[in-house]
Image (cartoon, helix red, strand yellow):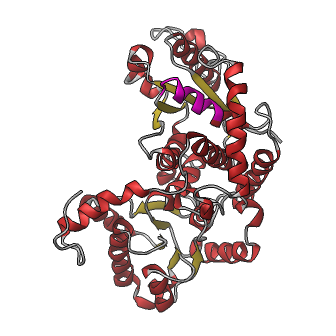
Amino acid sequence: MQNINVKIDNALNKIGQEAVKEMLPEVLAAKAHLVNGDAAGNDFLGWVDLPENIDQTMLRSLKADVARLTAKSKVMVVIGIGGSYLGARMVIEALQSEFAAMDNSDKPYIVYAGHTLSEDYYAQLLKVLDRVDYSVTVISKSGTTTEPAVAFRIVKAHLVEKYGSDEATKRIVAITDARRGALHDIAVQEGYPMYVIPDNVGGRFSVLTPVGLLPIAMAGYDIDALLQGARDMRKLCIESDDVAENPALLYAALRNILYRKGRKVEMLVNFLPNLKYISEWWKQLYGESEGKDRKGILPHSLSFTTDLHSMGQYVQDGERLMFETFISVDQPATSVAIPADEQNLDGINYLLGKSLNEINHNAELGTMIAHRGGGVPVLKIAVPKVDEYTLGQLIYFFEFACGVSGYTLGVNPFDQPGVEAYKKNMFILLGKPGYEGQQLV
């Protein structure tokens, strides 16, 4: 078994081993709060032990529903916003072909709704759904969050019109609160299969609950391997207090050291386009967990080498306000070599005999060295390969490090009071009952 690990060779000129040692007591105290559940937000720590405590009866039922829906669906519409869809999308897009939409696969193709209020998006989605057999997973703890509620009403009406009420009911799965809320009540009334979002797991930490597991399984991926990877990483994170062994502790320590040195922006960098949604999930995880009390590192992301041709100049020579964290994948799933060309008009015959992976890794190393030389600390998360097991490790690693880092920063990593302001303003502007006469904030 190969674990992911954090390497700091290209950041030591900005950090130093002594700084890590000095930060260690704070990080260990934060870890103790997380494990013991004795600090702010302790009612949302269900994710800490989730990989060990997963309900096997629920998993069997979930897999049975996946098999049933797969047999009748070319497309699965996943309705949710934020943590209700980003975790599943991260895993699915990391594992599937970049051209999966064009494949004639026997597994449903996953599309997403409830994450936007774009009228054009839904008009285009409905045109597609006119032509294919599909089913729906709707994910919301309350059922009243505007974006997914609007999407579900639109898609459900289309589903009923296309298949009739009885068949539509058989094509919908709800993932929601166990006892209350609009979606819970609709699911009970309509008779949808229903899976529970645990009360003690916040949305951005919910990918290893049915929120992520059902869509990932619908896409044809091995959720048992995903959970095993998380289980093994949990054991390492919980049991080891040594930053040389525990990558989550090291990552949390390094982030806080750099933050205190004035590095207020972290750019998560990948060199593989299928990792884009890891960055999107990570941005919510860290932004929503740490961005409060006028504190927090701003999470940003870049996809190299593509963004080296647009943002590379700023990273190399712009204001020194950031550090980078590279996700570096050791082994690709496939191999492609550069073909020979006798004329060599493009001048790349020197690359003959090298795989694209070798070329890409040298681009990665060259970028690290250049950015370090330009004064940008570069952390590296080394990932053996991209598969379900390793993604399970990566998910738990980032989650545990986020909890430790947030407590080290001095905030409650498990609330999100700031997200309510835009909702209140939107409700006032739209004339929602109960908001009459209230002032915009």
Name above or below for residue 245 compared with residue 92. Answer: above
Q: Is residue 246 above or below residue 115?
A: above
Q: Position of residue 380 (x, y in %)?
A: 63, 28
Count up the numbered dots.
0
What's the residue at 73%, 48% (across, down)?
Answer: 32
Residue 187 in percent (x, y) is at: 49, 84
Instruction: Specify whether 218 is left or right of 18.
Output: left
Q: Is residue 421 above or below residue 184?
A: above
Write the residue at 44% across / 47% down: 292
Q: Is residue 269 magenta?
A: no
The reply to whether the magenta stretch includes residue 259 is: yes
Point out the stretch of residues depicted in magenta. 253-263
106 left or right of 309?
A: right
The residue lying toward the viewer, choosing from 265 and 84, is: 265
Q: In the rendered image, which quarter is residue 384 located in?
A: top right
Residue 320 versus residue 339: which sits nearer the camera? Answer: 320
Q: Of helix, strand and loop, which mostly describes the magenta segment?
A: helix
